[in-house]
Image (cartoon, rainbow, N blue to C red):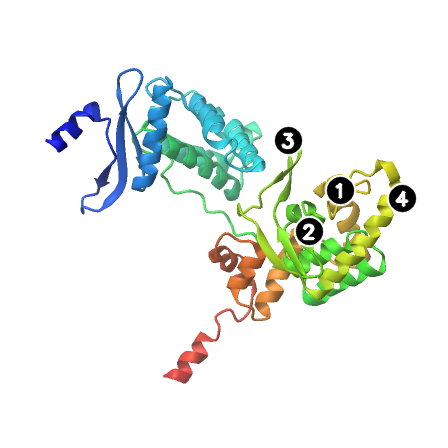
Amino acid sequence: MGKAGKAKGRANGDGDVYPRKNKAGQIVSYRGAYVAPDGKRRYVSGKTKTEAREALAKARADAAGGVVFDAGSLTIGEYLDRWLSDSVRDTVRQRTYERYESIVRVHIVPAFGRIKLKSLTPANVRALYRDKLDGDPERGVKPLSPRTVNYIHVTLHKALGQAVSDGLIPRNAADVKAPRPDKPEIKPLTQDQARKLLEVARNTDERFHALYTLALHCGLREGELLGLMWDDLDLDAGTLQVRRTLSETRTGHKFEKPKSGKGRSVKLSRKAAEALRLHRTRQNKERLAVGSLWEDNDLVFPTRIGTTMRGTNLLGRHFKPLLKRAGLPDKRLHDLRHTCATILLMAGKHPKYVQELLGHANISITLDTYSHVIEGMDGGLGDAMDEAL
């Protein structure tokens, strides 16, 4: 009787989620049904029972508020506008949102914007990728790199995946083979070059000598360096807390969470701590020199009046001229981070510790990025087998 009553309370399929199985009987996803404001039964799905239940709860809440998407008439352009505003904005870093929005506006909507969401096919998606890779010389359209086309794929696949979860379409049309981007070549400084860079910066009283020292000794990203505050440092204990990154968005500078989504604690080297102490003395002198013009934002590496520093200004006015003074090849500031990782790995430090220092989300990123530039990363496996057998 209890079960019958429960079933009656879930009429029209408006119940809990249930598993979906493949031909082998394995559970591949979970699906749930609800009744929309228009009286129609609609479905949501998720890879796990928890994901499906969360999607079902959201769909029911939307239905209670009168929100309904008619997949029969909804165009891709209309859906992507809603996806960006409802599912992406305020759930990712501002720069990430802007990248998604730009890809949608520049690449996806011009191609698919007027097509019905339910009518998009994998063939349409493959044709888009091919057109982007080939370009159109007659119309002056240059081909895009595989990496850029892969960004288009990731954006479209994520958006359509949400549509599948919301029960708007039965399958993800972007479930096709994506272009394989070339792995960017890592070009770190050698140990001698890194040593010379810091030596010249120190001897020429370079204003950002401490920043370059931190980048090389601790592997911090540019945004993490420019978002660093004195309150994040304990020079007596020799520690640094990475709590934020400074992003340059369309509307100006914005402090956001680090790239991995969480902060990390970094042990300062003796030379890094020493450079920061000297930098604090320099900054106090700059502060006194400008007087009331100084804006106290507690930043370690601000402009000369205490405001947030633009990465382009740091690069063009300070880092590039320093490279020329030191007689070093042209490099990106990010290459100092690569140099830090490479030196540590070549010194035999465990990749797990390097991963934690750099703030990579998982160790596979560290190994995939740096293993090909390090000689002897096979760990002497062949010699070990010869000795054993």
Q: Secondary structure at mark 1?
A: helix
Position in image of residue 68 (x %, y %): 36, 19
- Can you identify the residue that label 4 sits on? 289
Where does residue 341 sit, x and y in percent of width and height?
60, 61
For disc 1, the marked residue is 313
Q: CA distance from mark 4 to mark 3?
A: 32 Å
Few, some or many C-alpha atoms within 10 Å of disc 3 (few <14, some 14-19, many ≥20)?
Answer: few
- The reply to whether residue 187 is in sight is no
Q: Residue furthest front?
A: 2
Crowding near pointer 1: few (<14 within 10 Å), some, many (20+)?
A: few
Question: In the figure, residue 125 lies in which quadrant?
Answer: top left
Find residue 152 and report its horizontal and vertical position in percent. 48, 36
Residue of label 2: 333
Quarter the C terminus occupies: bottom left
Indicate the amino acid at tag 3.
Answer: Arg
Residue behind mark 3: 250
